[in-house]
Image (cartoon, rainbow, N blue to C red):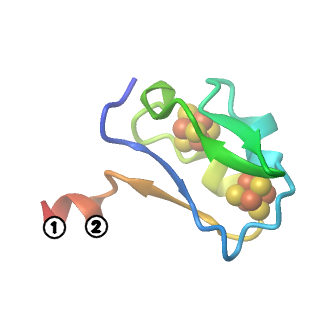
């Protein structure tokens, strides 16, 4: 489980297909206003990119990815 690695949804690109919500086995997302919301970021598995890979809108990025860490 990760403290600093969790998905961030780009709501500009997200179509609300909810594939990511159904895909994640760790309950990181819940649905709010027909869009995925990250409600349990600490459940996300560090360096898992499962939901990013299945999002056909490329609407998921990660807090704690190398680009973010480089800034810290
Ligand atoms: S898979 Fe992508 S487009 Fe579909 S709900 Fe999740 S973030 Fe949005
Ligand atoms: S990266 Fe993996 S563990 Fe984290 S929310 Fe996506 S599918 Fe779930």
Question: Measuring 20% from the left and 58% from the top, which residue is drawn there?
Answer: 69
Q: Secondary structure at mark 2?
A: helix
**Residue 25 image offset from top left, x and y in percent:** 68, 25
Q: Which residue is mark 2?
A: 67
Q: Is residue 55 visible?
A: no
Q: Which residue is mark 1?
A: 71
State left or right for residue 19 relative to residue 66: right
Q: Secondary structure at mark 1?
A: helix
Q: Residues within 10 Å of mark 1 (few under 14, many from 20)?
A: few
Disc sitting over residue 21 in the figure: none
Q: Nearer the viewer, mark 1 or mark 2?
A: 1
The answer to whether 16 is drawn above or below residue 13 in the figure is: above
Question: Measuring 12% from the left and 59% from the top, which residue is drawn there?
Answer: 72
Q: Is mark 1 within 8 Å of ligand 2?
A: no
Question: Measuring 61% from the left and 24% from the top, which residue is drawn there?
Answer: 26
**Residue 24 image offset from top left, x and y in percent:** 68, 33
Of the 4 image quadrants, the one containing the N terminus is top left
**Residue 56 image offset from top left, x and y in percent:** 77, 66
Can you tell me which quadrant of the image ligand 1 is in? Answer: bottom right
**Residue 10 image offset from top left, x and y in percent:** 60, 67
Question: Measuring 82% from the left and 59% from the top, which residue is drawn there?
Answer: 16
């Amino acid at each position: 489980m990760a403290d600093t690695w969790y998905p961030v949804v780009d709501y500009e690109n997200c179509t609300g297909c909810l594939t990511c919500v159904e895909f994640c086995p760790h309950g990181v997302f819940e649905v709010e206003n027909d869009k995925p919301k990250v409600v349990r970021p600490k459940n996300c598995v560090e360096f898992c990119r499962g939901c990013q890979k299945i999002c056909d809108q490329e609407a998921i990025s990660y807090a704690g990815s190398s680009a973010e860490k480089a800034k810290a």
